[in-house]
Amino acid sequence: MEQKFRILLAKPGLDGHDRGIKVIAAALRDAGFEVIYTGLRQTPEQIVEAAIQEDVDAVGMSILSGAHMTLFPAVMKLLKEKGAEDILLFGGGIISEQDAKKLQEAGCGRIFGPGAPTQTVIEYLKDTLPGRRKRESIL
Amino acid sequence: MTVLDRFYKKDRSALSRIISFIENREDGYLELLSRIYNISSNSYKIGITGPPGSGKSTLVDKIAIRYLEKGFSVGIIAVDPTSPFTGGALLGDRIRMQDLASRGEVFIRSMATRGSGGGLSEATREVAIALESYGFDIILIETVGVGQVELDVAGLCDSTVVALVPESGDSVQTLKAGLMEIANIFVVNKADREGSGRLVSELRLMLESRGQKQKEGWILPVIKTEAINGVGIDTLTDKIIDHRKHVENLYTQSGYREKRVKSELITILDRKIRARVLKELLEDNSVDSYVKQIVNGESDPYSITEKLMRKITI
Amino acid sequence: MSDKFDTKVETKGDSKEIARAFAEAKRKWQEDSENSKLKLNRKFTTVSMEEVNPLYTPEDTGGIEEVGPEYLKKLGFPGQYPYTRGVRPNMYRGRIWTMRQFSGFATPKETNRRYHYLLKAGQTGLSVAFDLPTLMGYDSDSPRSAGEVGVCGVAVDTLKDMEIIFDGIGLEKISTSMTINAPSSILLAMYCVVAEKQGVPLHKLTGTLQNDILKEYIAQKEWIYPPEPSLRLIADIMEFCTNNIPKYNTISISGYHIREAGATAAQELAFTLADGFCYVETGINAGLDVDDFAPRLSFFFNSHLDFFEEIAKYRAARRIWARRMKEKYGAKKELSLLMRFHTQTAGCSLTAKQPENNIIRTAYQALAGVLGGTQSLHTNSMDETLALPSEKAVTIALRTQQIISEETGVVNTIDPLAGSYYVEALTDRLEKQAEDYFDEIDRRGGVLKCIEEGFFQKEIADSAYHYQLEIDKGERIIVGVNGYVHEDEKLEIPILEIDESVARDQIAALNKVKEERDNDKVQRSLGELKKVIKTNDNHIPALLECVRCYATEEEIVNVMKSVFGEYVEPPII
Ligand SMILES: Nc1nc2c(ncn2[C@@H]2O[C@H](COP(=O)(O)OP(=O)(O)OP(=O)(O)O)[C@@H](O)[C@H]2O)c(=O)[nH]1
Ligand SMILES: [Mg+2]
């Protein structure tokens, strides 16, 4: 069977602008991904807990409120604490190139600017995800 | 340390990995299942099914809270449909269980049907085994909400709750056949809506007229709830607990456990054998050549089936 | 057009009759225009110095016979039912739209300083943007507020902050617009208590509360409680304002956010008006007379890229509102029938690529708003998709409006696009689409039911997805994004950064208030509030008391949450 990738999409922070994340959710679904949408206003703790329970390959976050420099690092830190840093964290929103660069240097995946074509996001995930999660022996 | 070792140490991320391992049918998953299978597990499985939007997730959320208050741990499986066209899926049940999700005693896993009908994914049964083995006291399983009611869940769960809403159909007469057989408890949710009283009496009337008011000594209850407002949830949980007593009682009768295990074994065998045989028979894409033969009028589906069946030897 | 929309002017008869009705309506319009107190002191000529009439009608082309009775039924004269051509008889010849740029500044102190500056520069209205924690009912020290304090607007935790914001500003002299929804009654109460402390009687207050919770569930998603208790809070506000602050606009019914979330023009029009009618019904069900509160309802629309479709949208909106208010809700006062609206250009149409192009997009959108007869206008800044707007970008945005008003000549004549085959057909089409949606909403059991089932959300998400797919496939070209792309584009716009000390200072100020206030009194007032909201009594008096003792916004919200619960969105994609 072809490998199914599971993606958690979340909107942390207080803003409610979910147009972008919903478009991405629909696009990923239509591209064959299993998308777990957790809705608005998730705390970093909730996001990381959900990512672990759902055993996702990637977490995508959309932030338009300007709080990205607080929220992305918070999620990255928690993923690391839980030994889940092999889960890809990527995102989008109103995020300046400088900030995106800083986040990527700190270990974050791609940050997509407003208006990024859905195809770019799909291709990025298809390129990045295979073989990314660490393989542990189960038995 | 293997993931299984960590699993036995109650590491949630190990549970999560094991579920993926099972769900993805990775090599060795049957062996894994045989190791974690436990016939005398104390977990109790409750299935929630019903039409789309009838409030299944909301009910699961509220029922889970009641069990937590009683000191039980809760594992939840929520199934949503995979698109037959794209293979993708949108799993949204978790949204309604958000407050639960951050509590330590709860574990929620969303699953896509991945091409299986019947309201569950093929792996749901096995994922439930993982949750049982991990030691959850209560396992809640929400089926997809396509069609009216999905029937598979009953074979898997100890108690099956069928949630209906006043607007789910013009009349109970239109409900899918088989519904009566699988339900242990009927819930009329959204009781705050007009028509809920009528639905309750129609359901009762129908159960009466079909002589299905009770089965194996269990009187089918019809309970009104307002899941979003938490109304009627205590009654519902109490009824589930009553039903559990009833089921446990049945288990003490000779032959009951055997009957359930037999049906479980047959279901597993059926799936595995079917998949295996199909794979063997249709290897090397020979199916395309059969199709061609039929289309060209050289053969027909029945002769081909007969020919293939003869190839099966045990 | 169906018969149920027959107007008072009987226009069925022969051409003589029609001509008579037309002449009568025209005479009335001329009279109203002349009697209007509003008159702009400027020349209304073209750049070639030719005279322009205030209004053109079928008389100026083929004569009234050519259009038949339809003209008066569907268009009429400006300031006359059904107001398709505008809400005032002389429109921009009487007064240019208000150029209202919405903005917020991190702390109450800075905001106060900026307001003094603006007032000195001749501005008479203030528009307060609150930060997200305030909009969502969290105090600045809540863990949920991390990273968001003072970012998108000013932070308000207690009455103290409002006292600072309006320090030295006489509330009787200014009109204040507050963009606040879920916790709107709390901010309104704070504003009232500031007035009280200044010795300004409530009936002298003017301004607008956005207070449109329905569009929050539908689009912007800044909700706190479920819809039903939220509507009850709104009914309380309508009642309180009708009796105490009669000049205050109680709801600004907003399509802007619905459009930004991805709706089409028809969806924006239909869902916004449906919300509006839902508020009207809420007021009527609360026992208010429609003519007492309807004049205080105003609207807020988006102006998107499709020039003619937008213009038609505004014209259709006025016509539908007037007709329904009259026919369905039995409104009698003219002010209840008039749809007054604010317009903001479409933030969602701006691109992060080649951001200077956004100036041009915004200009066309602003022009559409003006040709559609808007009462006030906000033009977006070119860098809004990148960060908070810089000073230069804000200035260009304002200049855009001034160029339209002073240089283009479009203000010289009223509703200049009337009679265009295209614009009139579009207006009719949009009206029809809206009516179809109203029927569908009714069939589904009304606005609240549609919200709960995610009907609006789904319609909007689908439109947004299809729009994006068209762009992705190149079927729709966005300049600089999927066409005319500039390889290795360098960003040359200065970007504003927010200072982290803002949150620290705000939290320190909050702690100080908590130390200085009488905590027993706070608890008592909150207990009283809880009692009142459990009944059907108006909650505003009890709320005013909580605010007076410096209860924080979050404390008050938590009391309400404990009674009303919290809203959870339906999982719609
Ligand atoms: N009026 C009312 N609405 C309810 C009630 N229970 C749930 N809802 C609403 O019904 C909608 C659907 O609820 P869900 O719990 O997501 O239903 P579901 O059956 O899990 O839906 P699917 O998984 O999509 O099939 C939500 O908007 C709930 O808020 C209730 O008792 N009364
Ligand atoms: Mg569900």
Image: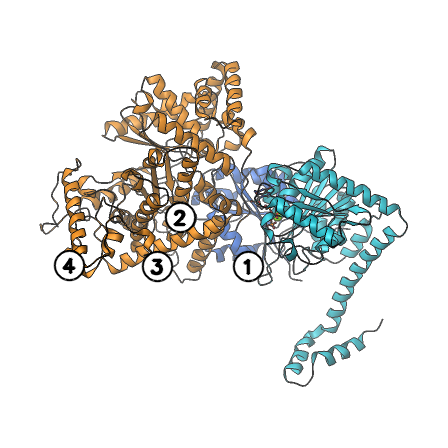
Chain colours: A blue, B cyan, C orange
* Local secondary structure at mark 4: loop
For this view, does C207 lie left or right of residue B229? Answer: left
* Local secondary structure at mark 1: loop
Q: Amino acid at mark 2?
A: Arg
> How far apart are the two marked residues, 4 and 1, measured between alpha carbons?
59 Å
* Local secondary structure at mark 2: helix
Query: Foreground mark, 1 or 3?
Result: 1
In the image, residue C92 lies at what x, y percent?
20, 43
Query: Residue at left 33%, top 18%?
Result: C198
Q: Earlier in the sequence, mark 4 or mark 3?
A: 4
**Count of all numbered marks drawn on residues in the image:** 4
> How far apart are the two marked residues, 2 and 3, measured between alpha carbons?
26 Å
Look at the picture and state if A49 lies above or below B175: above
Look at the picture and state if C62 lies above or below C212: below
Q: Are marks 1 and 3 in contact (CB under 8 Å)?
A: no
Q: Quadrant of residue B169?
A: bottom right
Q: Are marks 4 and 3 in contact (CB under 8 Å)?
A: no
Q: Amino acid at mark 3?
A: Tyr
Instruction: Name the outermost residue toward the right.
Output: B254
Q: Report the residue marked by disc 3.
A: C484
> How far apart are the two marked residues, 2 and 4, measured between alpha carbons?
39 Å
- Disc 4 crowd rating (10 Å Cα; few below 14, some 14-19, many 20+) is few
- Could you confirm whether marks 4 and 1 are on the same chain? no
Q: Quadrant of residue C309?
A: bottom left
Q: Amino acid at mark 1?
A: Ala
Q: Amino acid at mark 4?
A: Gly
> How far apart are the two marked residues, 4 and 3, measured between alpha carbons?
47 Å
In the image, residue C269 lies at what x, y percent?
37, 49
Q: Report the residue marked by disc 2.
A: C259
